[in-house]
Image (tube, rainbow, N blue to C red):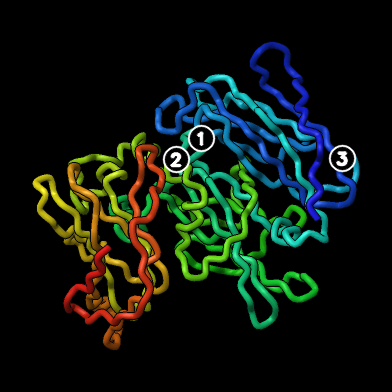
Amino acid sequence: MIAAFFGVLVAWLSAGPSPRTWAKPFVVTSPSEVLATLRAGCARCDWGQPGREAVALRLSVDGRYSQHILLARGEAPADYRVTLGALTAGRHRLTVDREAAHSAKGAGPVTIDALDVTMLARSDEAFLAQSMAPILHARPNTVGRFTDLPLLMWYEIVPTARGRQYRYSVIFSNEDGGTATDRLMATWGRTTDIEFVYGAEIDASEKILAEEFQGPGHEVPAFNGRHEGRHPLLWVSTDNNMVSQSGRTRIRYAPAPERFDLTGVSREMVMDRHPWSYTTAAVEMQREDKIDDRAEAGSGKIPDPRRYVHVEACAEVENAAVAFSVRAPDASGAARWYDSDRGVSEFRIVRSGCFRGAVPLPAFAGRPDAVRFRAYTRPPQKGAPPAPAGTVRLTRVNTVFMLDDRFQPQPSMFSWTGSTTLTLDGDWRELPF
């Protein structure tokens, strides 16, 4: 069972009204994986404002560096949950220091409302997953630049022929390289970057049989790198947040992973469970000048994210592409359809399973009242042999929503379950709300 340290007292080690060091002594009763939750905020912090983005906190356990936390969620206290790794039985001390060198110059004092420690014994069902959670070293060109921050980590458990695989994925606040922002919104319905980073296959005795990671070029080789305990050490190494087994960066992050079962839903559901992740991503887009209400498709920029309609659907897609449209009244009250591909073939969705996309409405459009889907033939791949005729079968629409004033999801407007085959390059399949 989970054994939570019952004390919540934080020892203030610095004099004065705004301390720069906090500490928490705690006792581990048996060898455990240890998690920490800081409920913290920082005055004048705003991830969307240059010079006030965040304060960097340096965490140490028993005097040894553990990781950094960037207080990227603003002034109001928010929970930051991290893994401290494997600790032996006995007395320990968690120390948190404000690190000026990596904090925004205009950020104000830090407030820590709670500093809690949780211990997972070997008997706890979450122990194994936490014990293998990756530790991510920062990409060098993000240090001090407040970009592409790892916001969340989750894991899935997938059966294998020899046992089961634990698969860890990370949601980054954006990607500085890779897919352009407007194409991200059209084909993924978000501006965050979601990446599988590490997998570990284990047998019934919990012995690790194989490890893998997602390296540059989206290749997935075997992992043969270093560990701390069972935690693999990874280095974010590309501008689209692929990882490597080694690197020079010493600053690192260790968000505590959550378990998710994504059967019948998209990976973006993890963001839905943490609506603040939408806010963080949107204000980073503002700060990086990637939002322009006059932005056209193909420009790499997007209109205000609050004008987008997000659609999650599920389909069996083979050698084909899918686009959707939403119907909404324009400023004059006339009903119009707005296509997710915006006339750009690269903005169509080409993956099977449950997917998200998003389409912007004009500034004064009304509430959507229908969605429709269409299948397209994919152009032949250069140098590849002719592919068989494509097929698309739509099976579900999970959610249709827009963002509120805080850039967070509003309640869904529509869902549908059924089975309909979309004719390649044929008519739209319309679903009224």
Who is closer to the viewer here, 280 or 226? 280
Q: Quadrant of residue 388?
A: bottom left
Q: CA distance from mark 2 to mark 3?
A: 35 Å
Q: Quadrant of residue 374?
A: bottom left
Tell me if I can see residue 7 in this picture: yes
Q: Which residue is mark 3?
A: 27
Amino acid type, mark 2: Thr
Amino acid type, mark 3: Val
The mark that comes first in sequence, 1 or 2, is: 1
Disc 2 crowd, CA 10 A, few/some/many (<14, 14-19, 20+)? many
Who is closer to the viewer here, 98 or 28? 28
Instruction: Confirm or deny contact between disc 1 and disc 2 (CB under 8 A).
Output: yes
Instruction: Residue at 47%, 56% (x, y): give it.
Output: 194
Residue 315 percent across, percent down from the top left: 36, 75
Q: Which residue is mark 2?
A: 280
Who is closer to the viewer here, 328 or 204? 328
Who is closer to the viewer here, 433 or 372? 433
Relative horizontal placement of residue 282, taking residue 120 as reference (left or right): left
Tag shown at residue 73:
1
Instruction: Residue at 55%, 28% (x, y): give it.
Output: 55
| Secondary structure beneath label 1 | loop
Of the 4 image quadrants, the one containing the N terminus is bottom right
209 is higher (above) or lower (below) than 172 = below
Instruction: Residue at 33%, 76% (x, y): give it.
Output: 394
Instruction: Confirm or deny contact between disc 1 and disc 3 (CB under 8 A).
Output: no
Residue reaching furthest front?
A: 433
Tell me if I can see residue 102 in this picture: no
Amino acid type, mark 1: Arg
The mark that comes first in sequence, 2 or 3, is: 3
Residue 110 percent across, percent down from the top left: 60, 24
